[in-house]
Image (cartoon, grey):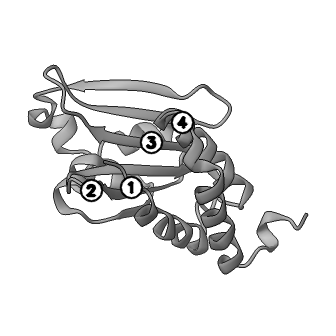
Amino acid sequence: MTKALDFSLADRKAELLRWLSEEGRFAPDTGRLLEMLCDKLTMLGAPIARATVHVRTLHPEFRGISRIWRRGQSTEFRTSRHGIESTSDYQNSPLQYVIETGQWLDTVLSEATDRRFPILATLRAQGITHYVMAPLIFSNRIVNAISWGSDAPSGFREADVELFRYLVPGIRAE
């Protein structure tokens, strides 16, 4: 098989679409889908070290759930309680920015990004060099989010981010 880096962007997009429609759609739950998706994106050459999915819930106690994937580790499951949206941690986070604006966040981590979004200082200390978060708009129009972090010295390539931009509209949920 050809090395992932030898695939053109069009080939990577076609393979990702094939995988989503033939294999990925059979993931038993969102945690496993995130794991499988990160494995696939990595095979396609994206240097992913960390990824997250944040989804709002209709639950009396919890505002949302998050799945956190880290290369070589088990996927973590977290819940956040109602009221988190009024905390400074949330109000100064990439998640709040993406959910409130509906805009993508694509940033190389630095002291400047640490000041804007303090959580990025933690990620940078863990070796993350480039962070991308996208709005994930479900069929009920609620904005959720998905993110990817790279620990490659130069971060993601432009073609990796383009692959993420191609992927996001195809992720739909009821």
Residue 121 vs 8, above or below: the answer is above
Residue drawn at point x = 21 percent, y = 48 percent: 96
Tag 4 and tag 3, C-beta contact below 8 Å: yes
Compute the Cα span from label 2 to label 4: 24 Å
Q: Earlier in the sequence, mark 2 or mark 4?
A: 4
Give the image location of residue 7, x and y in percent: 77, 73
Q: Nearer the viewer, mark 3 or mark 1?
A: 1
SS for dot 1: loop
Residue extending furthest toward the right = 1
Q: Earlier in the sequence, mark 3 or mark 1?
A: 3
Compute the Cα span from label 4 to label 3: 6 Å
Q: Amino acid at mark 3?
A: Thr
Tag 3 and tag 1, C-beta contact below 8 Å: no
Tag 3 and tag 2, C-beta contact below 8 Å: no
Residue named by callout 4: 69
Residue named by callout 3: 52
Residue 139 is tagged as 2
Residue named by callout 1: 172
Tag 2 and tag 1, C-beta contact below 8 Å: yes
Q: Amino acid at mark 2?
A: Ser
Q: Is residue 101 left or right of residue 106?
A: left
Q: Earlier in the sequence, mark 4 or mark 3?
A: 3
